[in-house]
Image (cartoon, grey):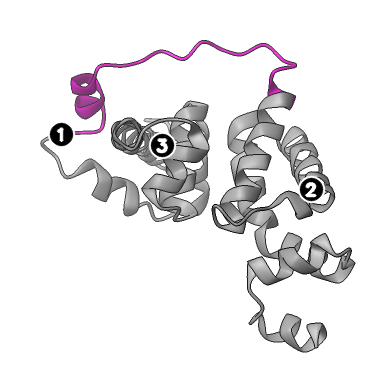
Amino acid sequence: MLDRQKSDGSISDRDLMVQVAAGDRRAFEQLARRHAAAILRLTRAVTGQAATAEDALQQTLLSVYQSASAFRAESSVRTWMLTIARNAAYRIRAKSDRQSLVEERLMELGLGAGWGSGDPETIALAAERKDTLLRALSTLSVQDQEALILRDIEGLQASEAAALLGIGERALKSRLHRARLRLAAALRRESEMSASAQEGPQL
């Protein structure tokens, strides 16, 4: 029965969790395949390194398998797994020195994102190249990346993302707004650098 469900993806995350808690290895492998990419995006944002992000992913999956019976369905399975992933990533990152994060004034963010020359969120969403967007995203602080990944990429509800990050929904809304502005500014810089490189040296 599980094989047929695995082929069409009809089995729910919560049903898979019940089977994982009962020791079903195949159910765990399906759950891991379903959410590994989302976990890796978040752990990479937190750790800033591909290798340590992979370590955090493996720790997360191990924790999910070992503590499946502790899942109480108070949130979605994905939110529960991302919470475990975030904690694992921060534990790994805590072993290295953390760079100080500077809070910029909202007006400065707006000017940097190009207020007066188009909506900054539209600029961000209109990025044509995936690698440009990834480079711009990587220049942001961990907090900004987390907010953008959880809300705009993974599509978590505001209440879920806020609970995962340990902040209120109003604080999340403010953080997300600033993160989008910073991303827009970073995309503008990436675009300008790309255009300059394509023009080449002036003869």
Which mark is in front, 3 or 1?
1
Residue 132 in view: no
**Sequence-earlier tag: 2 or 1:** 2
Which disc is residue 41 wearing?
none
Q: Which x, y percent locates residue 136?
A: 45, 37
Disc 1 marks a residue whose amino acid type is: Trp
Q: Identify the residue shown where x is 65% and y is 67%.
A: 13
Instruction: Identify the secondary structure beneath mark 2.
Output: loop
For the N terminus, which image quadrant?
bottom right
Q: Determine the main secondary structure of the stretch shown in magenta.
A: loop
Which of the two residues, 60 or 117, is positioned nearer the viewer here?
Answer: 60
Q: Identify the residue shown where x is 51% and y is 44%.
A: 134
Which disc is residue 115 wearing?
1
**Sequence-earlier tag: 2 or 3:** 2
Instruction: Identify the secondary structure beneath mark 1.
Output: loop
Residue 86 in view: yes
Which disc is residue 190 wearing?
3
Which mark is in front, 2 or 1?
2
Which disc is residue 67 wearing?
2
Disc 2 marks a residue whose amino acid type is: Ser
| Mark 3 and mark 1: Cα distance apart in space | 17 Å
Place residue 8 in its image quadrant: bottom right
Q: Would residue 114 appear left or right of 127 to someone viewing this image?
A: left
Q: Identify the residue shown where x is 56% and y is 50%.
A: 79
| Mark 2 and mark 3: Cα distance apart in space | 43 Å
2 vs 193: above or below: below
Magenta residues, start to end? 92-114
Q: Which x, y percent locates residue 176?
A: 34, 37
